[in-house]
Every structure is written in C-alpha cells, then in structure tokens.
Amino acid sequence: MVTSIILTLIALAFVLIVIEDIIHVNKAKTTLFFGTLCWIIAFISPIHGESSETIQHQLDHNILEIATLWLFLMAAMTFVAYLNSKGFIQNIVHRIMPEQISERKLMFLVGAFAFIFSSISDNITATLISLAVVMSLKLDAKKLVKYATLIIFSVNSGGVSLITGDVTTLMIFLAGKVTIPDLLLLVLPAIVSVFALAAMLSIGMNEQLYFARQELRRIEKTDITIAVIFMSTVLATLFLSVQYQVPPMLTFLFGLSFMFLVAQFLMRKKDVNKKIIDYIREIEYDTLLFFVGVLLLVGALKEVGVLSMFTELYQYLAPEYANYLVGLLSAAVDNVPLTAALLKAQIEMTPQQWLTFTYATGVGGSMLIIGSAAGIIAMSKVKALTFMSYLKMALYLLIAYTIGYAGSYYMGQLI
C-alpha cells in the first residue's frame, strides 16, 4: 500500500514537471514538495515494514549524495556566474568567432566543443560553459532548444570513455568489468553519434549567422586570474580524483575558496561595489532546489525496490538487448543507483557487453531532459527548454543513441 502511494506521488511529480508551462508552477517547488513528502510517508509507514532506523540510514545516504552534488554544483556555478557577469565568456567568444558562420557549422562546432570539454572536465561544468557560449549568441528560442539538446547529448557522450568523465564509467571500471584501453574504444562511436545528432538537428537550418563586431572590452587581469583558477581547479579535480581518490566536490570547494582569497587580494585597491563572495547570490537557486527534489524522488524510487526490477530484464533478454533498454530506462531512473544495482546482481557479461552497458548508462540519460544532470541544468538555464520541447527531439536523440550503441558493440569486438 505504502509503495503504491509513493510510486503514485513520484509519477505525479514527474507529470507536473511535464506540464509546468500549463500550470505555471515552478518545477523546483513541485519536485521538492513531493520528494520530501515521499520520505515523510516512508517514516510514518515504513516501506516493507522496515524500522525507522533503517529508513533514517537510507535517507542519510541519499542526503549525502545530494549534498555532495549540491556543493559541487554551487562551486562550479559561482565560477561561471562571476565570469559571465564580467562578460569574460562573451568576450572570448567574440574574439574567436568569425564575423559570419552558417548555422550548420555552428551546430557541429558546439557539439565538438561540448564533447571535448566534458572529456576534460565534469558534466556540470561542461554544460554550464557550453550553454554560456551559446546563450551569448542571442539565438531565437527554437534554435536555442536545438543547440541545448545537442549540448546535453554531447556532454553525456564526451565523458563516457574516461573514468574521470562519468561516475558510472568509474564504477564499472573499479568493478573490474572493463579496462582503460577498452573504454577508449568508445571515443569513436561516441563522437560519431554526436555528429550524427548535429547533422539531424541542423536540417533546415541554412541561414548565415552574422556576429556584430562589438568593441572588444579589455580583459581585466583579475578576470584572467580567476579564469585560470577555474581551469586549474577542473584539472586538479581530474588529477586528484584519479591519483588520490579526492572527492571532486572537495577540490572544487578548495578552488572556490582560493578564488575568493586571490580576488580579495587583487581587488583590495579597486573601487568595487560588489564583493567577490557576493557572486554566490547570482546562482540560480531554482536549479539547486530542483536538483534536490529530483534526487529525493529518485532516492525514494530506489528504496521502494523499483531498481531491482531492472535486473530481471537479463533473465528474459540477451545482454546486448537488455543493455540497450537499460540505457533508455536510465533516463527515468538515476543511472548511478541503477548501475550499482546491476553490479551487485553479479550479472555475467563479456567485456564487449560491459562496454555496451557503459555507453548505455552514460548516454541513455540524454533521452529525457530529467535523465541527467546536464539536462536538469540546461532546463533551468534555458527558459524555452522544457520537458515537452525536449521531447520533440526524442526521435533524433534515439537515432543518435542507437548509432552510438551499435558502434560501441562493434568496437567491443576489438577487445
């Protein structure tokens, strides 16, 4: 009975996200409301008759995951908020962009940039930077949705072949299912799928974009210093995570604090009305609250035992087909607990099949806007990007995902 109530509330929460434009209720409010309500019900009437202590332990584990992501996101967004407010990113774009470029070429350029940047940084940072670049070009709403869709897919594809690029890739690697040389085989099918999506999304986009040459503002030394600290923090996050298993959140918070101290020193003689730490207030807190709400809902979904149902797929389907479906299903269920559940189930698969599973769980979340952190952030940053407007791109995304998945299967034969 309790399980049915919680599943109904979770379904209702996702429906309200879909119809946000119709009811005009911010998705952060509805997800936070239903996310917390599900856990309150779980305490009042414990799932599967478990004790309050067990439910508390499950909630604590869920809150730890949320807090880790929340703090990381807050740190990354503060860096981007500062650089955006200073016009640093727009200034760089105007310096490197030609006066004229076709919409099609821009599509491929954006896809390649998001793919490469997500390979050397985390998905959240790559999404924020890529969106900042595109939004600085002042595109109309429909075209902006297409570019944002490509960014989400490209960002999720970019990190799938690196243990530093995607959490699920790291989990599968640490479980001994794939090796680093195996994972590198995913680079080719992943980039091919990104370019395939770019080609499909650019159909009918034949216009030339003209960028008015604005008077280039002088880039302040302080802004350059902070940009360098930002990139150094990204690189340090990768290195420390792989070499010493330092949590990315901790490294980014250190980088943020270092940025505060350096900026305070550099700005001490300047007549500035705004303190560097005040840029935290420019973060879209709707994004962070929406993030909390969604992860609470997913955590509740995990505790009612829905994730264990996915392992039953492998009893009825060959791993190649089951992996493909699991990737699609990861768009509705967080891929991290889903991957953990399948690893614990001790499912027997060949290295080739584990490679396709790695691609599927890393990229499959792109099928729905709420299926990945990149999608959640993009939806909160681009007003025209809603659940329904993204869903209109579903066929293109499915084709691109299928191309990438098939490529990962055939590349896996080289193992």
Image (spheres, rainbow, N blue to C red):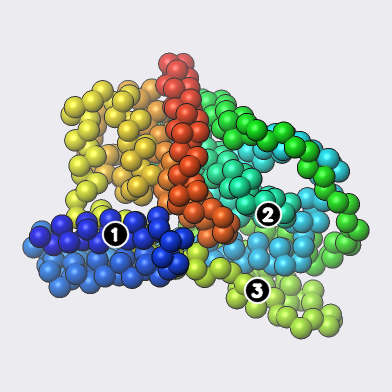
Q: Amino acid at mark 2?
A: Met
Dot 3: element: helix
Q: Is residue 221 visible?
A: yes
Q: Is residue 246 visible?
A: no
Please give the residue where the numbered disc 2 appears in the rendered image: 135
Disc assigned to residue 12: 1
Q: Nearer the viewer, residue 170 or 150?
A: 150
N-term mark: 3 or 2: 2
Q: At 47% across and 29% down in the image, what residue appears? A: 399
Considering every residue shown, the one lying at the far front of the view is 22
Q: Quadrant of residue 48?
A: bottom left
Q: Is residue 369 left or right of residue 111?
A: left
Q: Residues within 10 Å of mark 1 (few under 14, many from 20)?
A: some
- Eyeballing the image, is 407 above or below 166? above
- Residue 81, quarter of the rendered image: bottom right
> Residue 279, which numbered label?
3
Q: Residue at x 22, y 30 (%)?
A: 314
Mark 3–mark 2 distance (CA, rounded to whole Å)? 20 Å
Mark 3 vs 1: CB contact within 8 A? no
For the N terminus, the quadrant is: bottom left
Q: CA distance from mark 2 to mark 1?
A: 32 Å
Q: Amino acid at mark 3?
A: Tyr
Question: Dot 2: what SS?
Answer: helix
